[in-house]
Image (cartoon, rainbow, N blue to C red):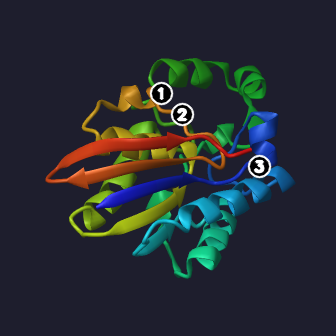
Amino acid sequence: MKFILVRHGETMANIGKIYSGWSNYDLTEKGKLQIKILAEELKGYKVDAIYASSLGRTMETAKEIARIIGKEVVVNDNLREINFGVFDGKTAKEIEENYPNEWETWLNDYESYRIPEGECLQDVLNRAKGFIDSIKEKDGTCIIVSHGGVIQSIITYLLDLELKKMWHFQCPPGGYVEIDYTDNFGYLRKLIPSYI
């Protein structure tokens, strides 16, 4: 299976460095242009399926790719970004001011500390693994349109790395990662930042 992991285009939350998990932020004009260019790039692949998180920014991204490629989008909530709970919609400074203890705990143990009313990164990985396990033995090429944290989690899973290694793989808004996966072994083929 060839996995093409696409991060949604730029949003106002990305610009404002706002923690946006399950909240919706629309794509900026730059984000829309990123996706148009990316969709044209992905047209060169023979794509068998397109999967996407149900959040607005990923759906807008996936629909543009699907329009260019000529495939339907299959929505899966396991591809949603981390639920940032009480941190959602706030900058790091606002979180530190309003939730200093929770912020400090999360920074020191993001893998297993569940943000109040939210998730930890292990929860995100478990969701993503469940989805990947359901499709990884298929042949062909799939595009998965998701979020930064989910994409990083999927990369560590497919490359058989510890979750804490996720920070070594930055996929910016409008970028994509290509991984070939055969016989339980993942090969990182490309990590492409946004074209603009």
Residue of label 2: 170
- Distance from Cα at disc 2 to Cα at disc 3: 17 Å
Figure check: 38 above or below 76 = above
Residue drawn 29% across the image and 66% down it: 135
Residue 16 seen: yes
In the picture, the quarter occupied by the C terminus is top right
Query: Nearer the observer, disc 1 or disc 2?
Result: 2
The answer to whether residue 60 is above or below residue 171 is below
Q: Residue at x 38, y 27 (%)?
A: 165
The residue type indicated by label 3 comes to Thr
Q: Quadrant of the N terminus?
A: bottom left
Mark sitting earlier along the chain (2/3): 3
Above or below, comparing residue 38 to residue 63 in the picture: above
- Picture quadrant of residue 121: top left
Q: Which residue is mark 3?
A: 11
Residue at numbered disc 1:
167
Q: Are marks 1 and 2 in contact (CB under 8 Å)?
A: yes
Q: How many marks?
A: 3
Residue 72 location, x and y as percent? 53, 82
The answer to whether mark 2 and mark 3 are in CB contact below 8 A is no
Q: Amino acid at mark 1?
A: Trp
Amino acid type, residue under disc 2 in the picture = Gln
Q: Nearer the viewer, residue 127 or 157?
A: 157
Q: Position of residue 76 (x, y in %)?
A: 47, 68
Residue 160 placement: quadrant? top left
